[in-house]
Image (tube, rainbow, N blue to C red):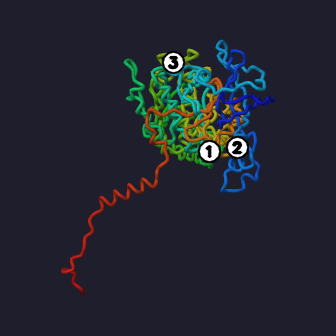
Amino acid sequence: MIGIVNHSDEEGFSFISAQRLPAGMFAFYLEGERKILCRVKHGEPLKQYPQEFLMDMELSPDEVSAFYGLDPQDFKYYSYSTSVVGYFDNLMGEFINPRTNPASGVKIDRAGEDVLKDISKVKAGDPGSALIGNVLGENTGIVLAVRDIVSQHISVIASTGAGKSYTVGVLVEELLKPYNMAPVLIFDPHGEYSSLGEISNAPEFVTSNYRPKVRIVKPKDIKIRISDLLVSDFISIMDDGTMSDKMKTLFRSAYHNLKNNSKKQFTRNELKQEIEALRDKNNDPTIDGINWRFGKLNAAIFDDFQTIPLADYFKVGQLTIMDVSGIEETFQQLIASIMLRRLFDAREGTENNRYNESHVDKFLPYPVFLVIEEAHRFAPQSGEAKSKIILKTILSEGRKFGIGVCLVSQRPSKLDADSLSQCMTQITMRIVNPTDQQQIAQSIESASRDLIAELPSLAKGQAIISGVAINTPALVKIRKRITSDTKGRSKDAPAIWAAERKYEEKHRAPEVKADEEMDVGV
């Protein structure tokens, strides 16, 4: 037992305890045979020392209390505000609020494994499970339901250094375990997930009939097929702010003429020929201007035939890491836009029987999972990005076609609010910026205000997990990763400088001293 109920109100109830208890911890009380789970919100001393007892720095308040004949123990009780979660209904598969608060005098106990296990929808190691960590301060595991993550999306939000990439790594590890074997793709703008390549050889992932594959796609191997570009993509690439309306109109005509001739795939040269076909004595300078700007499509990233091979990138039991580091941000957005468009078309077409095995480039017969790092780049709150519209479409409609998305960001206030609100499971780590905290509070309906207030004080590796993949929000300590995490860590600059200095001293060429006998003075 940790306390006794004092009084109740519309916010919940309070109980008295002689123990120091952390905010967010779980407790329970009995209502008949039912164990009613509740969450400690915050506490304060029930009785405070008189100020005069605290003004002598040489004496402890307890000594002053004893001198005046007071019992120091009277000042060691605390009142804790608490909210009711409810009892777990096995038939409903969720917590049911009893609609009544406990009566004064009811005993409050620390929640144990028998109660805390119901926070998770599935058991660790079962098909469709993802063990993320433990209830903070307890040994009870927190297991997310993969089905809900994939069908209704998830977000991982944290300030720099709070463990965001580490947590994504834990989630990906779970998705590649033998009990999930998910097809996962990470869109990696900083090249920080390469250590996940260890998954393919780690014994925790390998069984007698399963070994996950990891494919790392380097920037030089990422190509955008010319015929995958929309006319708006072409114009956004070519237009540096000086492209006239006449140029745009003529280019659109050339593009649509080519597409209307049943050319599902076409080359740069074929498009250029269509542009030239529009030349006459009245538009010579305009066509020349289009051709000059068309030269931007000669960049190495564009190709007449190569494209993002969905069937190779999304395979059951395979992690594909698209390393787009070193590629300029506008092209990163373009790559993401084209990949998302083709992915949505493939899954929608396959589900609606428009594509089958004969459509090698478009047939994708199973749900997939996509991690978008630096999501605020690809769906910004203000301004536009080439990838924003299609990403929002997938977030709103992807559930029907089996496209799960994980949005990862360190600046939620810069991430499109509609996109963030579509992620129905949230892993939120330390957030210090008040604007970001406000955005989180508005986007995460399932997390209460008292949990949101904990965001600035969370330690590295601690998170608030809430949403549909879990039965009630919880403070969680993220489990240790199986794979290493060298890329996501901050650089230890002093250690690197010291090592470099030692290396230089060890390999420094010996100093050549002048021979005084050979030194001839003038």
> Would you name the residue on which mark 1 appears?
282
Identity, as a three-letter code, of the amino acid under mark 1: Asn
Does residue 187 appear left or right of residue 376 in this picture?
A: left
State whether residue 111 appears in this view.
yes
Image quadrant in which the N terminus is located: top right
Q: Quick one: label 3 or label 2, which is nearer the N terminus?
A: 2
Q: Secondary structure at mark 2?
A: helix
Question: Is any part of residue 231 visible from this angle?
Answer: no
Q: Which residue is mark 3?
A: 127
Q: Residue at label 2?
A: 72
Outermost residue on the bottom side: it is: 522
Q: Are marks 3 and 1 in contact (CB under 8 Å)?
A: no
Disc 3 packing (10 Å; few <14; some 14–19; many ≥20): some
In front: 331, or 211? 211
Counting labels gives: 3
Amino acid type, residue under disc 2 in the picture: Pro
Place of residue 402 in the rendered image (x, y in percent of width and height, measured from the top left): 57, 21
Q: Where is residue 50? Give x, y as percent.
A: 77, 49
Question: Element under label 3?
Answer: loop
From the viewer's perspective, is residue 36 above or below residue 238?
above
**Snapshot quadrant of residue 261:** top right
User: For the residue labelled by badge 1, is the local secondary structure a helix, a strand or a loop?
Assistant: loop
> What separation in Å lies between label 1 and label 2 (alpha carbons)?
98 Å
Name the one closer to the observer, 70 or 364. 70
Q: Amino acid at mark 3?
A: Pro
Lower sequence index among marks 1 and 2: 2
Around disc 2, counting alpha carbons within 10 Å, would you say few (fewer than 14), some (14 to 19), or many (20 or more)? some
Mark 1: few/some/many CA within 10 Å (<14, 14-19, 20+): few
Q: How far across and down, in percent of the image, does residue 437 sit? A: 68, 41
Specify the quadrant of the image occupied by residue 20. Answer: top right
N-terminal label among 3 and 1: 3
